[in-house]
Image (cartoon, rainbow, N blue to C red):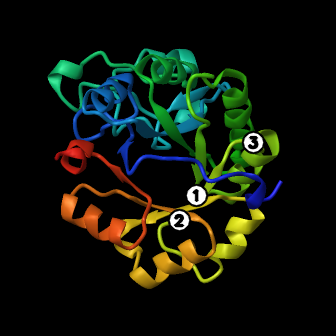
Amino acid sequence: MTKHDISLPAVPRVIGHRGAAGHAPENTLASFEAAAALGVRWVEFDVRLTGDGALVVFHDETLERTTDGKGRVGTTTLAAIRQLDAGAWFGRKFAGERVPALEDALAALQRLDLGANIEIKADTGREAETGGAVARALRAAWPATLPAPLVSSFNAAALKAAGDAAPEFPRALLVIKLAADWRRQAEALACVAVHCRENELTPALARQVLDRGYGLRCFTVNERARAETLFKWGVESVFSDYPDRLLAK
């Protein structure tokens, strides 16, 4: 299956980053709920494998920054991760918030009527395992009431494995800066879109992506003026920790 066999998904202009990471602890159900309350229609979140092969919504390789745990996610069991506090670091009112398993996140998306961009995070040596596991889980349990998820990753092996396991889900090449061979990478992975860091994009690069028929989105945009500039360049969507700033009338 090539890019041209998968239509570009209809994605809103503003996507909540890790839920609404400026308002609630990132990658938690509380963050999804905050995003929905702000009027966001899509959220982005990260998924990675635990030590016992479960899928959890978590950004970092290690637990310290956003939980009261220690060590690597990839060597810790799901049962142990479920015991951790993933909210107190952000604010007292979020104390007791847990790290969601992917299945918890999908149930929340259905309840809140939120579409999603799911970013695959993979430990070295587990890239294909992680990409395949995420895609199979989405194929088995993605809510039928929601638009198809958009799957992205910085890791080519993980994204390829996801595409092999569930080719019907649209994929996005995730980069910091567009390299000279970005199109070759995107074509090899049958991606429909490119996601890049906002401060690495130029009008010329944006035009290059758009002229070749790819969707273009930028992270992480927290100021309205910058978002408006990017939209003028043809950027379709931006990821924001503070989506309310960009959605305000």
Tell whether 198 sits left or right of 91.
right
Q: Which residue is mark 2?
A: 175
Q: Which residue is mark 1?
A: 154
- Within 10 Å of disc 3 (Cα), the crowding (few <14, some 14-19, many 20+) is some
Q: Nearer the viewer, residue 207 or 99?
A: 207
Q: CA distance from mark 3 to mark 2?
A: 22 Å
Q: CA distance from mark 1 to mark 3?
A: 20 Å
Residue 38: x percent and y percent? 25, 33
- Find out whether the residues at labels 3 and 2 contact each other: C-beta distance under 8 Å: no
Query: Mark 1 belongs to which amino acid?
Result: Phe
Q: Which mark is residue 237?
A: none
- 84 above or below 202? above
Q: Which residue is mark 3?
A: 168
Query: Mark 2 belongs to which amino acid?
Result: Val
Q: CA distance from mark 1 to mark 2?
A: 6 Å
Q: What element does badge 2 sit on?
A: loop
The residue at the point 64 percent across, 58 percent down is 192
Q: What element does badge 1 sit on?
A: loop
Which of the two discs, 1 and 3, sits closer to the camera?
3
The residue at the point 56 percent across, 74 percent down is 209
- 43 above or below 67? below
- Find out whether the residues at labels 1 and 2 contact each other: C-beta distance under 8 Å: yes
Q: Nearer the viewer, residue 80 or 35?
A: 35
Disc with the residue nearer the chain's start (1 vs 2) = 1
Evaluate whether residue 77 shows in this view: no
Query: Mark 3 belongs to which amino acid?
Result: Glu
Quarter-of-image position of residue 16? top left
- 182 above or below 139? below
- Within 10 Å of disc 2 (Cα), the crowding (few <14, some 14-19, many 20+) is some
Residue 78: x percent and y percent? 56, 20
- Within 10 Å of disc 1 (Cα), the crowding (few <14, some 14-19, many 20+) is some
